[in-house]
Amino acid sequence: MFATLISVALFSTLAIQGVLADITVQTPKLTQCGKVTFKWEETKAPYNVIVVSSTDPCGDVLADLGDVNDNQVKWTVKYPPGTKLMVSVEDANGEEGWTSSMLVHDSADDSCVPADLKPPTSGTSDPPPPDNSAPPVPVGAANAGGSPFGVGQESGALTMRQLSTPAMALSALIAAAATFAL
């Protein structure tokens, strides 16, 4: 009976971890008209990659980078300085990951930025808006916990994901024990 209980607990733990899996996406620095490579941990291809505004991540897709079979994609940043963006990666299993919020930094080259996105010219060279944003924070369960790329903030605190898996496994053990005891 004890062996059955252990088997149920191990199976439950593996099933729970599979449900809580997500993709860790690296957060690079963005520069106006610069080329950038987004990388993520390899899961199941193809990956659908989109760029959204970090001030409204559930809003309109700003750039659809398409379906990618590799665990990285290159992109030219066609947004002016001060724009805040995020990238979402979804794999073939529907698992998803996000970058942290990224601020587009200034460069001397603005040739790739569409005219409707460029700030109006006033005859003077205005500096880009200051970056008063808070430090990057993971959205939802995406990127919660450690990062295999060594990026992001690591506080050393346990995440909900790290705490919930053992709690659910223990609950499965208790439920199985209660069932066998009756």
Image (cartoon, grey):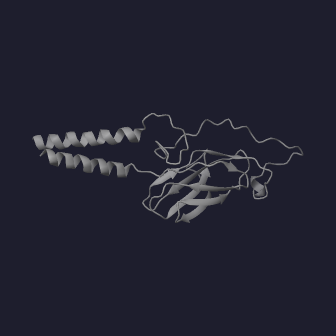
Q: In the drawing, does residue 27 fall left or right of residue 156?
A: right
Q: Position of residue 53 (x, y in %)?
A: 62, 49
Comparing 146 with 79, the one in front is 146
Give the residue displayed 51% in from the left and 44% down from the top. Answer: 139
Q: Position of residue 57 (x, y in %)?
A: 57, 48
Most distant residue in the left direction: 182
Q: In the drawing, does residue 121 fall left or right of residue 96?
A: right
The quadrant where residue 161 appears: top left
Q: Is residue 167 above or below residue 26?
A: above
Q: How many marks?
A: 0
Q: Is residue 49 visible?
A: yes
Look at the image and tell me in which quarter the C terminus lies.
top left
Q: Is residue 60 visible?
A: no
Comparing 116 with 164, the one in front is 164
Q: Is residue 68 above or below residue 135?
A: below
Give the residue displayed 52% in from the left and 42% down from the top. Answer: 138
Give the residue displayed 47% in from the left and 58% down from the top. Answer: 42
Q: Position of residue 62 (x, y in %)?
A: 63, 56
The quadrant where residue 82 appears: top right
Comparing 38 with 101, the one in front is 38
Comparing 53 with 145, the one in front is 145
Give the residue displayed 49% in from the left and 65% down from the top. Answer: 46
Most distant residue in the right direction: 123
Q: Position of residue 162 (x, y in %)?
A: 39, 40
Q: Is residue 50 above or below residue 127?
A: below
